Every structure is written in C-alpha cells, then in structure tokens.
Amino acid sequence: MSVTDELLENNARYAESFSGPLPLPPARKVAVVACMDARLDVYRILGLAEGEAHVIRNAGGVVTDDEIRSLAISQRLLGTEEIILIHHTDCGMLTFTDDGFTQSIQDETGLTPQWSAEAFADLDTDVRQSIARIRANPFVPKKDSVRGFVFDVATGKLNEVV
Amino acid sequence: MSVTDELLENNARYAESFSGPLPLPPARKVAVVACMDARLDVYRILGLAEGEAHVIRNAGGVVTDDEIRSLAISQRLLGTEEIILIHHTDCGMLTFTDDGFTQSIQDETGLTPQWSAEAFADLDTDVRQSIARIRANPFVPKKDSVRGFVFDVATGKLNEVV
C-alpha cells in the first residue's frame, strides 16, 4: 500500500464530516504565497478556515512568472486585495546553489533545464526580492498590503521582514 | 486593521502551543500539487500532519516550469517519491479563457503578459495533461506513483482521474 493510498483513506474520513460547498471567491480577500516546505501548514499558521484565502506555494516561496500569473488571476478575477509572502528558517533553498543543481541535473540526464532553481543565500534578502518582484509587476493591480515574513520553524512565529 | 493584521494575531496564538522544529525532509515522502483555491485545505483533505509532505499550489493546480522546478527540488534534494495532483470542481479556471484574460490585462495596462493564464475548459482533461507534463519531464526522476484527482468541493471527496 503506497502512502498515496493511505492519504486517500484519510480523505474518505474527511469527506464523512464535510460540509460544503463554500463560495468560490476567498472570503477574507487574501492571497498567501509560501514555500512548499512540509512544516508550513499555512491554514493553521494563519488561523485560516476553508474558503478564506488563496494559497500559492512553491520551492522557496519565490515569485516567478507562475506566481505572478496566480496573483493576477486571484486579484483580477477573484477579488483578493492583500498579499502575504512567507519564507521560513531552515529552508532547503539555503542548502544548494543554482549552478550546482543545474550541473547535477545535467550530469544525470544530459539535459540542462531552461529554468533556474531559484536558490538563495539569505532569507531576508530573498523575501525583499520576492516582495519587490510583486510590487514592480504591472499585472498585479492591488499593492496597498503586500507584506513579507519569515516563519520560524522552531517557534511557529511569523517575523515581518518588509 | 487589515485582514493581514488579524491573521498575524491568529499566528501569535498558533505559536503559543507550537512544538517544533521538525526535520526538513518530508516524512511521508510525498509532494502534492494542488490548485490555490481557498476551499482546498490540503493538509485536512489528505489528513497530513506538519512535516509530512511538500505542498505546491497555483492557479488551477496546473504544471508549468515552476511546478517542475519545485518537483525536481522536492525529489532530487529532499527525497520525495510520490506525487499527488489535485484539481477541483467549481474551479475559477473554468470561467474564462486565456485570450480573454490576456486581452483584459492588455486593455487595462497597455502591456501583454508573456505567460498564458493556463485556463482550461474540462477538469479531467487538464488533470490528464498536467499528469502527462510530469511524466514527460526528464527532470522529475521518480514516476512510479504520479496520480491525479478532482476534489469535489460539495462532498470533500477526491475522485481519481488518472
């Protein structure tokens, strides 16, 4: 039995007490961008209930074209107005370099990815850069509340950077 | 007081009973790719605890270069072996077209985004396409368990597509 099968059994139990459906637009009009890290249960960290906020996640919680795409759809079509960006301590992205990762892929597959791994050397600096990418982007219209945080995996606290 | 400020107060309460830190690599060796939709609380839907699975999310739960980047890092550097892809009923991506969205942005900003909105007309078809993009990609090494589902926002159930 795979882990996926076990998680599907969990889903069957979840559905037993499920009360839906909720409306499509996020009730709190917030979009969260966060790292994919397994320790970040974004709904619990922010006390969000189902239906309240969009949650966008990737390796690092960095802002690339795909996060801009998601934020543009979130704000333009589904009414969100605030953005919360979350990086975290002990992040995997601090443990390697873009060049090293690309080289290891090339060594193994014989192919070079056309994307960069988006690794970073300093958490606060990358939070600032990700926030700056959102602020500078013409396709994300609402920028009155765009705030960046580092989640501390030892304490559970969000510490504001910018 | 902004919604962000309210969510930060929730975080302060979360931190009071927080017990960390957990290890960096996901304990269940699973990566989930899901839509950013506010109604999808992925940890609850799959019965995941903190520290168990990577969670990657964007508008639609589609697979673009950025999801491949995240999956490559997840498998190559952090040891995940299974992939679960989740789209859902009543998805916002079913309500518009790429061309219409691009045109509305162009009308408002005078600029055309270089990315496509990745809208889709049929859920099952897009689940199959997203799974196919993962299977066809040379940078994601582990493909023994790559499964795609549609989450029903009315019942809370995951229905397998591929």
Image (cartoon, coloured by chain):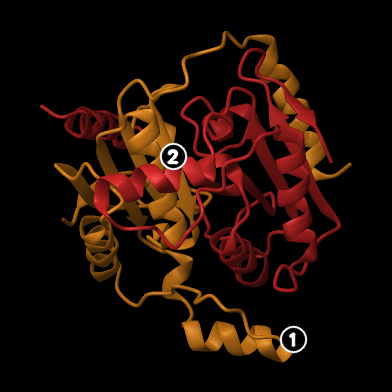
Chain colours: A orange, B red
Amino acid marked by disc 1: Glu
Q: Is residue B60 visible?
A: yes
Determine if marks 2 and 1 fall on one subunit: yes
Q: Is residue B58 visible?
A: no
Image quadrant containing the N terminus of chain B: top left
First of labels 2, 1 by sequence position: 2
Give the CA separation, mark 2 to mark 1. Answer: 33 Å
Tell me which corner region of the image, top left, top right, bottom left or bottom right, holds residue B6.
top left
Disc marking residue A108: 1
Amino acid marked by disc 2: Val
Horizontal relation, residue B162 to residue B154: left or right: right
Task: State the SS at label 2.
Answer: strand
Image coordinates of residue A36 in percent, x first then y, are 50, 53
Q: According to the image, label 2 marks what residue?
A: A55
A151, above or below A83, in the image: below
Tell me which corner region of the image, top left, top right, bottom left or bottom right, holds residue A8.
top right
Image coordinates of residue A150 in percent, x first then y, are 28, 55
Tell me which corner region of the image, top left, top right, bottom left or bottom right, holds residue A162.
bottom left
